[in-house]
Image: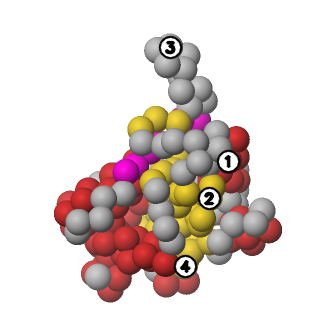
Amino acid sequence: MKRRLREILLAKSVILGKEFRLSSGKTSNFYVDARITTLDPEGAFLIGNLFLEMIKEFEVDSVGGYSIGADPIVSSISLLSHISGNPIPAFIIRKTEKSHGTGKQIEGNFKTGDSVVLFDDVVTSGGSILRGADVVRNAGGNILSIMSVIDREEGGRELIEAAGYKFYSIFLKKDLI
């Protein structure tokens, strides 16, 4: 599965040579438009299965992550967990609290006290996912781990681990270049 996912990422999502501005503010000639793969039927299937395997060591109540990068990831994990007979609900963290309706910043299946794993498509500096972790922790969540499809190897892992979280990724940047 990992080999096939790498093939899909390289064919559809990895862009080399052109200069891109990253969400961290840095520029890079290595860019991953991961949503093309996370929203691809086979890519979503592979990512969901690989992450389900990776979270087996944890007693997970729910899975979540920042919208929009984590949306297809946690949806595929949740769907595949149901199919496997061990359903794990999913939730999404909004960048800001909703200004109407319930005013929630965490949408979906999250409850105070849940033990959760957080997901992101690509981790560069780790700042975004750590802001999401703060939202979950402040809402009473117990974060078991943070995981990403790709670790760009630009300090994100170190920052996440320095904040006290276990961090795992399916791929490192060096696996894709």
CA gap between label 4 and label 3 equals: 39 Å
Q: Residue at x 49, y 68 (%)?
A: 59
Disc 2 packing (10 Å; few <14; some 14–19; many ≥20)? many
CA gap between label 2 and label 1 equals: 7 Å
Q: Amino acid at mark 3?
A: His
Residue bearing the label numbered 2: 143
The reply to whether dot 2 and dot 4 touch (C-beta < 8 Å) is: no
Residue bearing the label numbered 1: 137
- What span is colored magenta in the figure? 89-95
Frontmost residue, 159 versus 53: 53
Question: Which callout, 2 or 3, points at the residue further toward the start of the chain?
Answer: 3
Q: As drawn, is 154 to the left or to the right of 71? A: right
Which label sits in the foreground, 4 or 3?
3
Residue bearing the label numbered 4: 172
Q: As drawn, is 26 to the left or to the right of 118? A: right
Q: As drawn, is 9 to the left or to the right of 129? A: left
